[in-house]
Amino acid sequence: VQLSVKTRGEGQGPMILSDGTEDLGKLDIAQAEEWIAAHLAIDAIGRKPLYFTYRGSGTIDFLSFRFNKI
């Protein structure tokens, strides 16, 4: 599955996706004035909570996330 997140803002750097116990992957967030998508291929995880932790510099706006079939 592919996870896409839409962000914008002056910040840039990694956003970590986890299920609360282990990291599932890292998205690279780029600076942007308009909404842009970052993508991450992950294994199907079933039904679990998801945590998005932004660890970059600066601030971002987080609009949405979406799962897509690859």
Image: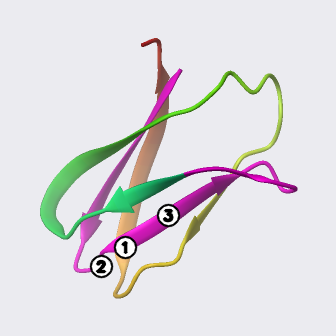
Report the disc number at residue 22: none
**Which disc, if any, is residue 15?**
3
Q: Which residue is mark 2?
A: 11
| Mark 1 and mark 3 residues within 8 Å of each other at the beta carbon | yes
Give how far apart the Cα atoms at labels 3 and 2 are. Answer: 11 Å
For the magenta stretch, what is the residue range?
Answer: 1-25
Crowd tier of the residue under label 2, counting other residues whose Cα lies within 10 Å: few below 14, some 14–19, many 20 or above:
some
Amino acid of disc 2: Gly
Task: Mark 3: give few (<14), some (14-19) or many (20+) Cα within 10 Å.
Answer: some
- Mark pair 1, 2: CA separation: 7 Å
Camera-near label (1 vs 2) is 1
- Residue 15 vertical position relative to residue 40 in the rendered view, above or below: below
Disc 3 residue type?
Met
Give amino acid for label 1: Gly
Which residue does the image show at 36% across and 67% down from the upper left?
A: 61
The secondary element bearing badge 1 is classed as strand
Question: In what element is the residue under mark 2?
Answer: loop
Structural crowding at the residue carrying mark 1, measured as other residues with C-alpha within 10 Å and reported as few (<14), some (14–19) or many (≥20): some
